[in-house]
Image (cartoon, rainbow, N blue to C red):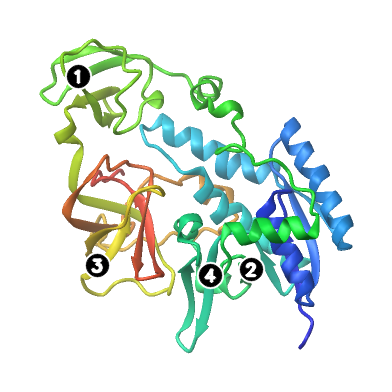
Amino acid sequence: MTEERVAVALSGGIDSSVAALLLKEAGHEVIGLHMHLWDSSRSEYQARQTEALCSTLNIPFYVVDSKKEFALNVVDYFCREYKRGRTPNPCIACNQQIKFGFLLAKALSLGADFLATGHYARIEHSEDGYHLLKAADLSKDQSYFLYTLTQEKLKYLLFPLGSYTKTEVKQIAQRAGLAIAKPSQDICFISQKNYRAFLSQRLSNIPGEIVDAQGVILGRHQGIAFYTIGQRHGLGLASGKPLYVIRIDPEHNKIVLGDKRELYRQKVTAQRLNWVAGKPLLGPITAAAKIRYKSREAEAILLPPRHCDPEPFTLCHSERSEESYTAQGKLREGEAISDIWFPQPQRAVTPGQAIVFYKGDEVLGGGIISNGEIEM
């Protein structure tokens, strides 16, 4: 076979390490790329582990300084969304803008034919294009985080672990004697999972009212960035019945509480839509949808995209431009949005989270939940 040059995004963890090993054993010319995303002792430890892995595999090792891009497109986005009363998913932003944006461009500039990662997902190619599929190990499937991928990017990507189970990956690492870094926390730039402390250092939080759905004042909140839809604990209220955050009103700086029944929604509106096949919907379809990574798929009816005004508006900024990222999460006038209807109401539909659509094992696309609130 023709030897292909594959750049592997290496974190020092087991998944990316085994991905590099499998590609090396398959006869590819492999180079290791480690992104320096954030200044911390954890980041330095991962860099050392990654360099040691590349030495073991006898492959070139490059450190890619991505701190500026990561801060702008992931950290700033994360803070900005919480300030607006939304709950973002920074991993999706990182995949779209950093791994499969900035790093992919870097890999191609180094002469690589492909960029590979340790994601648990699959890519198949047919006459009608590239298809993004769930992983063979559904318990580890990460296709939800990859819905922003496009046809143009998929042709340059490899997911070597897509057909393996996590158990098999661990066995491969053990047999090869790979030194593996300890697993990182959920949000790589926040230590000890204390996102409230992190946000407090970066946002000016303004206290305000906690009210019920009728507007009756129940108490005071410490800043809307510290709350999310469905939250029950940490509200600082004494009540005779369980109360949950059912809505966050950034315009009036209010947190709205209700009972469990009021958490359920049948209609979801999504913005910043991406269809993996590159073709938007022309008519209603029935698909499976997930409103967050850990939620179960539910039957949903997807309606064709509509716009905020009669005249279409096209976002034409480059994917790597600063201007396009500063608007992330805010619905622009004329931007396409879609309505999604669930026959079975969904609990705690959360603005800022991703909703991802599936047909069987295939990812159709997805968007960011805006919950029907059009922001100009």
- Which mark is nearer the camera, 1 or 2? 2
The answer to whether marks 1 and 2 mark residues whose Cβ atoms lie closer than 8 Å is: no
Local crowd at mark 2 within 10 Å, few (<14), some, or many (≥20)?
A: many
Disc 1 element: strand
Residues 183 and 232: in front is: 183
Q: Which residue is mark 1?
A: 211
Residues 175 and 274: in front is: 175
- Which mark is nearer the camera, 2 or 3? 2
Between the C-alphas of marks 2 and 3, the distance is 34 Å
Between the C-alphas of marks 4 and 3, the distance is 27 Å
Disc 2 element: loop
The image shows residue 26 at horizontal and vertical percentages of: 75, 76
The quadrant of the rendering that contains the C terminus is top left
Q: What is the quadrant of residue 250 in the picture?
A: top left
Residue for point 28% across, 43% down = 349
Q: Is residue 78 depicted above or below 17 in this figure?
A: above
Disc 3 element: loop
Q: Which mark is residue 304?
A: 3
The answer to whether marks 4 and 1 mark residues whose Cβ atoms lie closer than 8 Å is: no
Q: Which residue is mark 2?
A: 160
Q: Which residue is mark 4?
A: 122
Say whether residue 200 is left or right of residue 262.
right
Residue for point 79% across, 49% down = 179
**Amino acid at the residue labelled 2:** Pro
Between the C-alphas of marks 1 and 2, the distance is 50 Å
Say whether residue 71 is left or right of residue 65.
left
**Amino acid at the residue labelled 1:** Val
Local crowd at mark 3 within 10 Å, few (<14), some, or many (≥20)?
A: some
**Amino acid at the residue labelled 4:** Arg
Residue for point 44% across, 69% down = 276
Q: Earlier in the sequence, mark 1 or mark 2?
A: 2
The answer to whether marks 2 and 3 mark residues whose Cβ atoms lie closer than 8 Å is: no
